[in-house]
Structure formats: structure tokens, C-alpha cells
Amino acid sequence: MVVVLMVAEKPSLARSLAEILSKKQCRRRKSDCSACDVYEFEGIFPPGGGGVRVTFKMTSVCGHVMSLDFQPQYNKWEQIDPVDLFDAETMKKESMPNLRIPHFLRNEGKGVDYLVLWLDCDKEGENICFEVMEEVEPVMRHQRIPSTQAVYRARFSSITESAILKAFGALGLPDWNESRSVDARMELDLRIGCAFTRFQTMTFQTKYAGLNSSVISYGPCQTPTLGFCVQRHDEILQFKSEKYWKLAAKISRGGRGGPVVSLDWGREGLFDKEVTLLFLARVQDCREAVVVGVAEKPRSKAPPIALHTVELLRAASSKLHIGPKLAMDYAERLYTEGYISYPRTETTKYPKDFDFRSILSSLSGHPEFGEHASSILRTSIKPPSGGVDVGDHPPITPMRSASRDQLRDSEWKIYDFVARHFLATLMPECKYKLTEVEISIGSEVFHWSGTTPTSPGFTAVYPWQEVHGMETSVEWNKDQHWNVDQVAHSGTSE
């Protein structure tokens, strides 16, 4: 019987793919790699017309199969000038020798007729495709069906049945150029990182005898980023705060139980306390405030554009209090389990053929935001006009419904944010009224401003950008008189 070996990037992804492609009829068996199981089932290959019945073997690697390093003779720091590392010979070696992934791939690939690569659809995944091919192709059986190729590449952005079956029905070829770009990046990282690490470590150890560090590492990406952190830290240390002074007032109306309002001074803060006290003296005995101007302006807040990786990590940190590393771990787990689409993307514009309706339908019964999904379905779906398509993956979206009970707490927070962000992009803008009031107390002018929501729009499902109304309902009119309860000065450092 014809045998097709299929390889995913992670063990959990292999399980999910096997369950979808076999309709949960696959058989799991252990392999000689402790981390990677093999799932077997029968089916038709190639899919579509003209296929034959085959046995599928779905398994995985654990990320990169190989890593790049220098030849052993270059590992002696004292004998090798760091400059020589820019031209030194390199070699490929196993990324995880204890797992023996190359041996495992050769063993599972022995005698198979076809190889289908289900690695993640990014440049790293493309590079891993060729690492897998290097181990499997030499041991494949080469008596294949005439005029057909032996190696296929599946491209997908989410782990849903429809997306996986669509990818399986449109198999292509791995991209050699993308893979080579990763090889180039790895070589640059190795040469630059090792050369500068050795140079600065030996330099500092010579200069500072008591240096409490055996290695001072340099990373082509990390070190420049660290430079920004150090620069900001220096600015904070060198900053000299200077105190400035300003006036503030409290006014009331209607006696006991009436509204009490705090006012801001119309002038900028003053660095001279004595001058501020002179202004205070001019109004301290005033007991009446007069409204000299009221302006009401309609305002709106546009819904967010589609979600990409940077915004997800930024929001996870600032809104959900989850660090970037953990946030990405949770997002990748949600992706592998089919709850969200691929979480590594720079694209913020939905594709023209994006299937909004199926995602909205899957969310319409959700107990927390299903009402909003149903409302969008009842109206015409209007994707946001902004955003950029950089040609990598679609924006991050939910792929199926999930409840709090199905996910761990932090995973739920990430899923909830992704789902709400997706819904928010398809909802109307938030509308509110901005009221700005100018009030005179004696010869000084004070200001008050407040917002009143008129139509929540997308903020009904996206509370992180909600416009809050005034705590105290106040009706302002020109020439209105208020009682002055207090005028005081305060000092603030900046």
C-alpha cells in the first residue's frame, strides 16, 4: 500500500491535524522519539479526483531539527581571534541531540511514497521543511505514481476543519528562497553574536579584574534593544524634577445635595510660587463663579483595525497584565487547539475573501459576546477600511467559540481579547459629546470638561476603549452662577 508521511512542527499540532484529517479515526502509536507520537489512518491521496487509497502517518518535529555552529576548533576562545569568526567554517548539528529527531525522521520516512510538510507557515517553518526533507528524502521509496511529485507543502493559517481540509486540497511546494533567507539570518546571528560576545567578554575581563560574569553576551537584536532601555534609564536618572504651582477650585450649586464640581486653572502651571500666591490672593475671597462660555462638540472614536502580533502583545501587557513571552505562549497554544488563527503576523487588513460570516456564526451563541456577533450578522458586514496587508498571514481572529470553563484563566484572557477585538473591528464607531465650560472667578478663568456617551458602538464589546460619562450630571448654561467653595494652590513636580 502507498504510504504518506506527514510532518507538523509540534506534537500537539500533529495530533490536531490527524484528528481533523482522519475525522478522529486515527490510531496513535509511540515512536523511538519520546516527544513525538505517530498517528496512522487511511484515506485518499492526492485529495480530490484521481487519488488512490493510502496509509497516512502523521507525526512532528519539535521546532528546528538542526542548528548552526562553528567547527570544534573555533571553540577555543583564547586561541581564536574574534575577527576570525566572520570567516570561520560552520557546521550543522542536531538542535536536540537527546531526542534524536534526525534518526526518528529517517526511521519513519523509510520506504514512504510521499512526504507532506505541515510546518508553520512562516519563514522558520519553511526552513524546517527543508531540514525534514534532508532527512526523509534519501530513504523514501522512489517508485511513485508516474508524473507526480513526492514532496508537498501544506499552507494554512488556522487549525479548523475547513482551513485544514482546504490546505490539504491545495498542496504546493516548499519555498527554497524563504528557507535560504533563514539560513542567512542564522549565519549572521551566529557570526555577529559570537564574535562580539567573545570580544566584549575578554575585553571587560581584562579591564575589570573583579567582573562578576563569565560571559557578557551580545545579540544582534537583543543588544540594540537593551541600548534603548539603558538610554531611557539614564534619562530618568539624569532628570531633575522642578516644582510648579497652579490653582484649583471647587464650586457648588443648589445647596446641600447639589452638584459639586472641581475646576482646572486656565493658566499653565507657574514655577514661581510667590507669583502663584499673588493670583490666589486675587480670587481667594470671591464667593461667586459665573459661567462665561459653554461649548458642546460631537466626537467619535473609530473602531480598531484588525489585530496583528505587536498589538496583541502590547495589549496583553497593558490591558491584561500578561507579559509578552507568556502571551505568545498562550496564543500559540490557542492556535494549536484551533481557537484562534496563526498568532504571528504583521498584517492588519482582512483579505477580500475573508469568511466573516462563518466566524460570526460560531460566536453568535457565546454567553458573553454572542449578542454582538448576532447583531453584526443581522446587518451588512463592513470590514474596516484601514490596515495593511504585508502578505504573510491574515490578522489574528477567533476561529471557534470557547468558554471560560474550557480554557485556563490566562488563555481565556487572550482568547477573550482576540474575540472582542475581532467583533469590535466590524462594529460602528463610538460616539460621544464633549462639553467644555469656561468659568470666571473674579479676574481668573477656570475650565471644566466632561464627556457624555451618545452611542457606544464598538466599545459595547471592547471595554478597554470605553468612553466614560460624567460622574455628576450637570446642566451648564451661559451666565449661570455657582457658589465658590474653595480656591487653593498646589505644587507638583514634573
Image: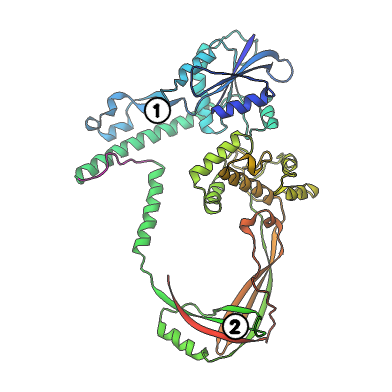
Question: Going by the picture, which residue comes out furthest to the right?
Answer: 378
Quarter in which the N terminus is drawn: top right
The three-letter amino acid code for the residue at tag 2 is Ile
For this view, does 5 lie left or right of residue 433?
left
| Colouring of the image | rainbow
Image coordinates for residue 216, horizontal then vertical, percent = 30, 41
Q: Where does the magenta region start and end?
A: 210-219
Residue 101 within the magenta-colored segment of the rendering: no
Residue 384 visible at all: no
The three-letter amino acid code for the residue at tag 1 is Leu
Image coordinates for residue 65, horizontal then vertical, percent = 46, 25
At 56% from the left and 22% from the top, the residue drawn is 59
Corner quadrant of residue 467: bottom right
Alpha carbon distance from label 1 to label 2: 71 Å
Compared to residue 309, the image places residue 50 above or below, namely above
Q: Nearer the viewer, residue 271 or 199?
A: 271
Compared to residue 139, the image places residue 323 above or below, namely below
Q: Kindly state the secondary structure of the residue where label 1 is placed.
A: strand
Image coordinates for residue 69, horizontal then vertical, percent = 36, 28
Question: For mark 2, does the 10 Å Cα neighbourhood hold few (<14), some (14 to 19), or many (20 or more) residues?
Answer: many
Q: Nearer the viewer, residue 218 or 252?
A: 252
Query: Which residue lies under the disc numbered 1?
Result: 68
The dominant secondary structure in magenta is loop
For this view, does 245 lie left or right of residue 8?
left
Residue 345 visible at all: yes
